[in-house]
Amino acid sequence: MSRLIRMDHTGHSTLAQWTADDPVAVEAAVQAFRKELDRGYFGMVSTGEGHAEQVKELPVAADLVIMRLPISGG
Amino acid sequence: MAAELPELAAVHWRPRVDDARLTRSARAWTLSTCAHVIPFLAAGIALVALSPLALPVALAARAHAWIIPELYAQRGANVVRPKRTRAPAEAEALSVGLLGDLVGHDARALHAQTGLVPERGRLGTWLVGPAGALLVRRGGRRAYCYCVRVNDTALPTGDRIAHLLLALRADEQGFATVANMAFSGAPWRVRRRLDPAQRPALDAARALDSRARD
């Protein structure tokens, strides 16, 4: 089961869970993903050890999609 | 090439950091340190040579030559100084659990011990903390200290590190460009200014970088 999570003040929140063969769950995850993008979050997926990629559409095949906030120099 | 960090738009005037630029920065920091130290040392020696009675002033000049580089090193070490978190303990534990899922066993163990997460990159070996990161390069012989953080200081520390780690993994050069360099110099200068609990992390990063270079 794939998960969309957002790093937030609670540690993290699971926003959606889906399997690729469940179109209703996928659509709900896509909507949740877009909503977070609209709130200023970035979608990230791991692409192997030590690598990650920012995604602008929900990658349905990914096991874990993490929403993060922007960073800046301190 | 991997996609650039979107945060780069906020610092569009900065040239993208690469190996050559880091080497130039290191040279500039070394020159700057020499420019601070040598005149004070020379003045101290000259004063004593002119008149032994000037010894107290010479000692004061020598103290300046010592303290200015130390203050810079302190500024560098401060980027990873542990700070009290405002997040509840439950959120802290949950965030550390997620961070643990993103890294390997050794990195998890080092984080538990020191609060810093090691990450091997193309530019060198990073140590990522909640509000800053250290980069160790040239086989562990050079350290760069960066101020960089997620724009929500109320997040639990594990999440703050995970934000930086994901950005670093997505675009390492972009990460180094967005971050503000606070210091560059010999790792031993940073090490003695670190919290004692964090020093093993720098030792581990130096060892990792040294092995990667061999």
Image (spheres, grey):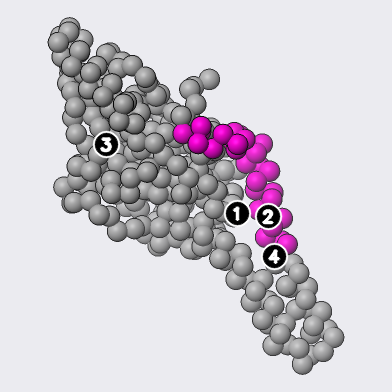
Indicate the amino acid at tag 1. Answer: Gly
Where is residue A38 shown, x and y percent of the image?
31, 26
Q: Which residues are magenta?
A: B7-36
Q: Are marks 2 and 4 in contact (CB under 8 Å)?
A: no
Pointer 1 local density, CA inside 10 Å: few below 14, some 14–19, many at least 20: many
Q: Which residue is mark 2?
A: B30
Coordinates of residue B95 in the picture (x, y in percent): 24, 42
Q: Is residue B29 left or right of residue B121?
A: right
Disc 3 is attached to a residue of which chain? Answer: A
Q: Chain of mark 2?
A: B
Q: Residue at x 51, y 32 (%)?
A: B9
Query: Residue B185 got which mark?
Result: 1
| Alpha-carbon span between mark 1 and mark 3 | 34 Å
Question: Residue B121: in sight, yes or no?
Answer: no
Instruction: State how far apart marks 4 and 1 are (Cα).
Output: 14 Å
The main secondary structure of the magenta stretch is helix
SS state under label 3: loop
Q: CA distance from mark 2 to mark 4?
A: 10 Å
In this rendering, which labeled residue sits more in front, label 2 or label 4?
4
Residue at left offset 68%, top offset 43%: B24
Whether pointer 2 and pointer 1 mark residues with C-beta atoms closer than 8 Å, the reply is yes
Provide the secondary structure element on which disc 1 rests.
strand
Do callouts 2 and 3 point to residues on the same chain?
A: no
Parent chain of label 4:
B
What x and y, as percent, mark residue B91? 19, 45
Q: Position of residue A23 (x, y in %)?
A: 17, 8
> How far is mark 2 from mark 1, CA to CA?
7 Å
Task: Check disc 3 and report the residue beneath it.
Answer: A7
